[in-house]
Image: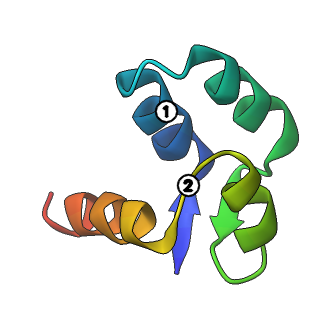
Amino acid sequence: MKIEKSKIVEMLRTRGDNALAQQADKQLPPQIDTDQHMEQLSKLGLNPQDLTKLAGGLLGH
């Protein structure tokens, strides 16, 4: 599954995780492949359920 970095940064900020949002913005590429980047996403406190919800929101628009 591919997700834009901006959506992940936005989700982290919405949670109040501003430090993690800044870290994600610096470390992640513009387009994230969840399979390829799962280790980095896990370090940011994101799990597959979070990403599925985020992708579901994107697909719903």
Q: Are marks 2 and 1 in contact (CB under 8 Å)?
A: yes
Q: Quadrant of residue 24?
A: top right
The amino acid on which the numbered mark 1 sits, given as a three-letter code, is Leu
Q: Quadrant of residue 61?
A: bottom left
Separation (CA) of disc 2 from disc 1: 9 Å
Name the residue located 55 percent from the left edge and 55 percent from the top edge.
Answer: 46
Q: Residue furthest right?
A: 27
10 Å neighbourhood of mark 2: few (<14), some, or many (≥20)?
Answer: some
The amino acid on which the numbered mark 2 sits, given as a three-letter code, is Leu
Q: Position of residue 38 (x, y in %)?
A: 71, 71
Name the residue located 44 percent from the left edge and 64 percent from the top edge.
Answer: 51
Q: Position of residue 36 (x, y in %)?
A: 78, 79
Return the mark for residue 12: 1
Identify the residue position indicated by label 2 in the image: 46
For marks 2 and 1 on the same chain, the one whose residue lies earlier in the sequence:
1
Give the side of residue 17 with respect to residue 15, left or right. right
- Helix, strand or loop at label 2? It is loop
10 Å neighbourhood of mark 1: few (<14), some, or many (≥20)?
Answer: many
Given residues 18 and 1, the one toward you in this image is 18
